[in-house]
Amino acid sequence: MSNAAQTGPDDRDQVVTARLRWVLAPIGGLVAWYATLFLGLVAVGLLDSMCPPDEMVSGMCQADWYEPAFDALVAVFSGIAAVLVVLVPALIAPTHRLRMAWIAYGVGATVAACFALGSSSLHPPAAAALLGGATAVALAHRLWPRNQET
């Protein structure tokens, strides 16, 4: 009897589910990034609403506190996005979660470095993303130790 004949419906369902989870793992990272981007834009909208009307010039806030607050928001949400981009694919992956976290961090770090090379104004958000991603990898090591990887 061949191996195919010995596999039951439950085995096939598990294989299909595992393959689907592998396909969805990188998509989950992208969804996490876009969700964080959306929340960051909402936060910037809230920041804009705090600007006094007399400080608004052509739709841009000119208050002294605005630029540092905006830069801080961008950095914070860059770090949050990095944490989610590393952990979400690892959580979705059916096996090798620690490896998936490292792969996601590598891809994210490369993207952050490319953005930072393009503009010096993106150095702080890139640094926040690298730190957030590294923190997520450290958490992944605690959640899924190497000797327990399947």
Image: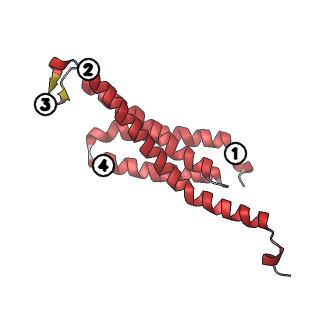
SS state under label 2: loop
Q: Earlier in the sequence, mark 4 or mark 3?
A: 3
Mark drawn on residue 58: 3
Residue marked by disc 1: 145
Dividing the picture into quadrants, the one containing residue 73 is top left
Q: Estimate the x, y position of residue 123 in percent, counting from the top left.
A: 33, 39
Q: Earlier in the sequence, mark 1 or mark 4?
A: 4
Quick check: 60 above or below 114? Answer: above
Residue occupying the point 53% across, 46% down: 86
Please report contact status of discs 1 and 2: CB closer than 8 Å, yes or no. Answer: no
In the image, taking residue 79 as reference, residue 101 lies left or right, namely: right
Please report contact status of discs 4 and 3: CB closer than 8 Å, yes or no. Answer: no
Distance CA(mark 3)–CA(mark 1): 53 Å
Q: Estimate the x, y position of residue 122 in percent, counting from the top left.
A: 31, 40
Mark nearer the viewer, 4 or 3: 3
Distance CA(mark 4)–CA(mark 2): 27 Å
Distance CA(mark 1)–CA(mark 4): 34 Å
